[in-house]
Image (cartoon, grey):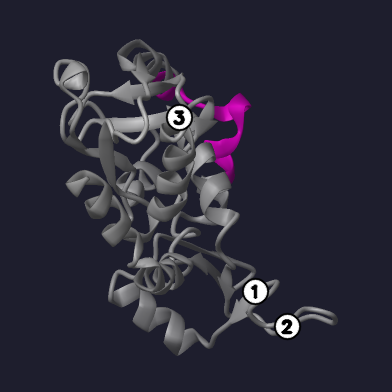
Amino acid sequence: MSSRKTLISKQTGQDDEEIDLITLEKSLNSIDAENMIRKISHTSISDDAEKKCNLLETITRTVQISCQPPLIPFTVQGGSAEGCLILVELVLHPDLLHVLATDDIILSISGRKISGMLLRDVRRLLEGLFAMNESFYMEIVNKNSIPSSITEILAGEDYPELQIVIRNNVYQKTVPYTTRQPRNGEIDGVHYKFVDVSTFRQLRDTNQLLEHGHYQVRFMMDA
């Protein structure tokens, strides 16, 4: 019962998470536009990056989670609003004590790739699974095997496939920022958030940008 209360109480921070997500929106374009295209393209992945892709597959393990409602087998922490991958927080079921550990990185849950998702969305996904008297599978990477920081992963070239997953999940929740003027039909806050150069520089200098770049003298960014 106490573990359920813990999980519910953490979900009351949704408003704070939305505020943090606004910060995240100013950071996802922080790698130069050309560099970003080079990283995402499968035809331009370096040999070292390909080795890292293979390494990630090698160190990823699959864990079966058996659910016995109303028990909660484990809790999670992190999430894109904190600039972090989804991590195991507390292992509550004794059968999982030798399977999961605090700060293990969860890459997928029941086939859903979750890197870059909000913590509250992952908790909702888990709550639905925990409520069923069935089992599901997760893909796990041991803590410290790869960086848990989203900005560190996106700034490097080691995990291109993971970068794509993160961007896809973050872009579902964010609106990119730009310093260019709105075009016909574009709505501020819907298609882009339009800011001036001084605002961009302030965001950049205070490390509020996950990624940023420039194209034809204009700055593009996600926070």
Q: Quadrant of residue 211?
A: bottom left
- What type of secondary structure mainly makes up the magenta span? helix
Q: Quadrant of residue 189?
A: bottom right
- Looking at the image, which is closer to me, 185 or 128? 128
Disc 3, SS: strand
Q: Earlier in the sequence, mark 3 or mark 1?
A: 3
- Looking at the image, which is closer to me, 117 or 110? 110
Task: Identify which residue is drawn at 48% across, 29% down.
Answer: 132
Q: Which residue is mark 3?
A: 109
Nearer to us of marks 1 and 2 is 1
Gap in Å between the C-alphas at discs 1 and 2? Answer: 8 Å
Q: Which residue is mark 1?
A: 192
Q: Which residue is mark 2?
A: 182
Disc 2, SS: loop
Gap in Å between the C-alphas at discs 3 and 2? Answer: 39 Å
- Classify 99 as above or below 101: above
- Classify 60 as above or below 169: above
Q: Is residue 120 left or right of residue 164?
A: left
- Classify 183 as above or below 168: below
Q: Is residue 8 left or right of residue 161?
A: left
Range of residues picked out in magenta: 37-49
Question: Badge 1 local density, few (<14 within 10 Å), some, or many (20+)?
Answer: many
In x, y percent, where is residue 179?
58, 80
Q: Earlier in the sequence, mark 3 or mark 2?
A: 3
